[in-house]
Image (spheres, rainbow, N blue to C red):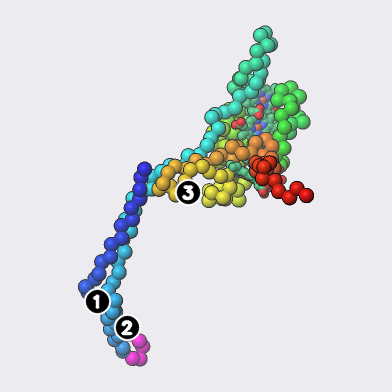
Amino acid sequence: MKYTYAKFSVKTSAKHLVIGGLCLVGAIAAVAVESAAPQLVTTVVAEPVVHAVTLRKPAGPPTATAHNPDTGVAAQIACATCHATRTPNFDNAASADLDLFHQGLVVQHGSNTCLSCHNSADYGSLHLANNKRVEFTDVVTLCSQCHGPQWRDFQHGAHGGMNGYWDLSKGDRTRNGCTSCHDPHAPKYQGAHPTLPPRDRFLETHHE
Ligand code: HEC
Ligand code: HEC
Ligand code: HEC
Ligand code: HEC
């Protein structure tokens, strides 16, 4: 446990404050003001805040499920296994365009096409609007460049939730990444009904 101490020291100045030499055009007036109250100097010494804010990130690039045609066993394979030798196809924009592989993938995300996010130069990564590479682990950077208001709210703690402490002098904080809650392909937040509280059958009233 770490505590933050705030030290307050009050110094009383023996010297009296003199404000003088106020000159006006046409008349010379020297006004000397002696302060009646002692001068108050407040020094706040706070230890630096030490606790960390951790962002939940995806473990790494995703993999695709394929099966070995000889054994029939499903295996997780890297995107580059196929895409390193395939010419990127910018005409594959929506789920409906896929008939050779990735069939059934649901992408409902505004006007985005597959290669709005996926990096045609390396399918093991994503890209920003200026075509700069972004790792899958840094997907928050990608989401945030198109969703400014949510990113602003996120930075202020009003979007995205957290675990841990508001007061970082008391403990660590963990933030969720955008994809902790939103599926990047179909990001609309799935609404849910709150569960009703448990009902005690012995406390039922008004049997008429
Ligand atoms: C087994 C081979 C294979 C693997 C592994 C694979 N893909 Fe593909 N991918 C394809 C094929 C084939 C197409 C073209 C589909 C079509 O035209 O119907 C495609 C199309 C795409 C497209 C659409 C753009 C384009 O170039 O056609 C994206 C984006 C994509 N894949 C991303 C990925 C990502 C991300 C991974 C890793 C998680 C991955 N793929 C793994 C074979 C593969
Ligand atoms: C808004 C950005 C965005 C768009 C648009 C997008 N993807 Fe993705 N895609 C991602 C991200 C981020 C992941 C990683 C998800 C994760 O970490 O599980 C991903 C994962 C994948 C995967 C591997 C995991 C899986 O779901 O199978 C494939 C394959 C893939 N995308 C293909 C496509 C194809 C094909 C399209 C177009 C039809 C497309 N993506 C459109 C951002 C996007
Ligand atoms: C290239 C720009 C772009 C990127 C990158 C992007 N989005 Fe979007 N997003 C859009 C557009 C466009 C819409 C549709 C807005 C509309 O319909 O008004 C949208 C809609 C959404 C919605 C609302 C969906 C709904 O149906 O209500 C959510 C949530 C969302 N995006 C989350 C994300 C997340 C999470 C990421 C990162 C994985 C991301 N976006 C990346 C452009 C983007
Ligand atoms: C803890 C879960 C959570 C996280 C993390 C999260 N969101 Fe959301 N987001 C939501 C919920 C819930 C809604 C739906 C709010 C509503 O329907 O009023 C939402 C709505 C949205 C919308 C649609 C807003 C609208 O008015 O239609 C966008 C865009 C969005 N989020 C982007 C992001 C981005 C970008 C990030 C990461 C910086 C992010 N979200 C992180 C839970 C989350």
Mark drawn on residue 22: 2
Residue placed under numbered mark 3 in the picture: 166
- The residues tagged by marks 2 and 3 sit, at their Cα atoms, a distance apart of 50 Å
- Disc with the residue nearer the chain's start (2 vs 3): 2
- Disc with the residue nearer the chain's start (3 vs 1): 1
- Disc with the residue nearer the chain's start (1 vs 2): 1
In this rendering, is residue 23 above or below 107?
Answer: below
**Three-letter amino acid code of the residue under disc 2:** Leu
Per the rendered image, the range of residues in magenta is: 21-27
Q: Confirm whether residue 38 shows in the render.
A: yes
Counting from the top left corner in percent of width and height, residue 148 is at: 60, 49
Mark drawn on residue 16: 1
- The residues tagged by marks 1 and 2 sit, at their Cα atoms, a distance apart of 18 Å
Of circles 3 and 1, which is in front? 3
Counting from the top left corner in percent of width and height, residue 22 is at: 32, 83
Report helix, strand or loop for mark 2. Answer: loop
Q: Confirm whether residue 130 shows in the render.
A: no
Counting from the top left corner in percent of width and height, residue 74 is at: 65, 16
Q: Residue at x 53, y 35 (%)?
A: 57
Q: Which residue is drawn at 48% across and 48% down?
A: 166
